Image (tube, rainbow, N blue to C red):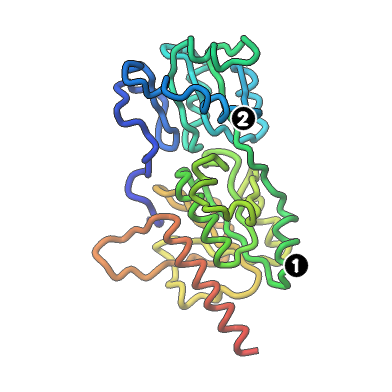
Amino acid sequence: MAYEIFGNDMTELHTDSKKKVSGVMKGADVSSDAQDKSGSFDSDKENLDKELSNNRLEGRNAILEAMRAGRTIDKVFIQDGLRDNTISNIISKLKGTGASISFVKKQRLDSMSETGHHQGIIAQTTAYNYSQIEDIFELAKKKKEPPFIIILDEIEDPHNLGAIIRTANICGAHGIIIPKHRATGLTATVVRASAGAINFTPVVKVTNIAKTIDELKNRGLWFACADMGGEVMYKCNLTGAIGLVIGNEGSGVSRLVKEKCDYIVSIPMMGDIESLNASVATGILAYEIVRQRYSAKSKM
């Protein structure tokens, strides 16, 4: 059992929506404007158009190709009532990405569209670009420190990712690596939750976490995987060039990724429950790494 969050933090979900969308699960924020009488979607069209700005994608193929290319979709507006295979496929692919999905009337999409060919769907991508692994090593070199990297294995909650980015910056980690699929990307929610840390902490998106760990091992890093069945963190040597691996909020670190790690580390639990929010667990383990680094320096 890995560190988990109880349920999902879905504070942005429109709880007054009465429609249920099949295929939409945790990590995708879904709403509907079927109740236009409330004015919730009609109140500020000008601000909505500004939000879409230059990161707008219109049409099904444009959105699918952007997702295949690894771009992070932040918000999606779908024509109310559309449930064909392509739309269902897009919704399915957005599962666990932190994207916000809103079902709106066709007139709303027509007014938002710049091309006039939205095909019932318009999306907004994140404005933040991803870094490269070399950027992480360059930052470590600049600080004259052994690399300290946080690897996230399918973190789906955008608030968790934003909080982890913030913690990574404060504790001196040189970068974060996230997977391309089945995980939240750099959405607006993530950016807000990072409290500005996203501007200073490299975030790298990779296709395969296990393969990336192998490549980083060849560059001298050791890897510690967070899991409740591991050795208590105080007994593990977490100094030197290290990667800290944190797993999914519910299922933890995947088996293949766990097998690639050198240490399985746990946080001692003194209470009546046996789980921690993923971002809290990251903070505790990250600062144990900081503590051990300070201790090692003082002995030199």
Residue marked by disc 2? 67
N-terminal of the pair, mark 2 or mark 1, is 2
The mark found on residue 142 in the picture is: 1
For the N terminus, the quadrant is bottom left
Q: Residue at x 47, y 63 (%)?
A: 283
Q: Position of residue 94 (x, y in %)?
A: 51, 31
Q: In terms of depth relative to the viewer, which is nearer, 155 or 170?
A: 170
Q: Position of residue 299 (x, y in %)?
A: 61, 89
Q: Position of residue 119 (x, y in %)?
A: 57, 11
Q: Is residue 70 above or below residue 255?
A: above
The part of the image, by quadrant, that contains residue 29 is: top left
Q: Residue at x 29, y 71 (%)?
A: 270
Q: Residue at x 37, y 44 (%)?
A: 9
Q: Amino acid at mark 2?
A: Met
Label 2 neighbour load within 10 Å: few <14, some 14-19, many 20+ = some
Q: Residue at x 55, y 55 (%)?
A: 165
Q: In terms of depth relative to the viewer, which is nearer, 189 or 92?
A: 189
Q: Position of residue 188 (x, y in %)?
A: 53, 40
- Side of 49 relative to 37 (left or right): right
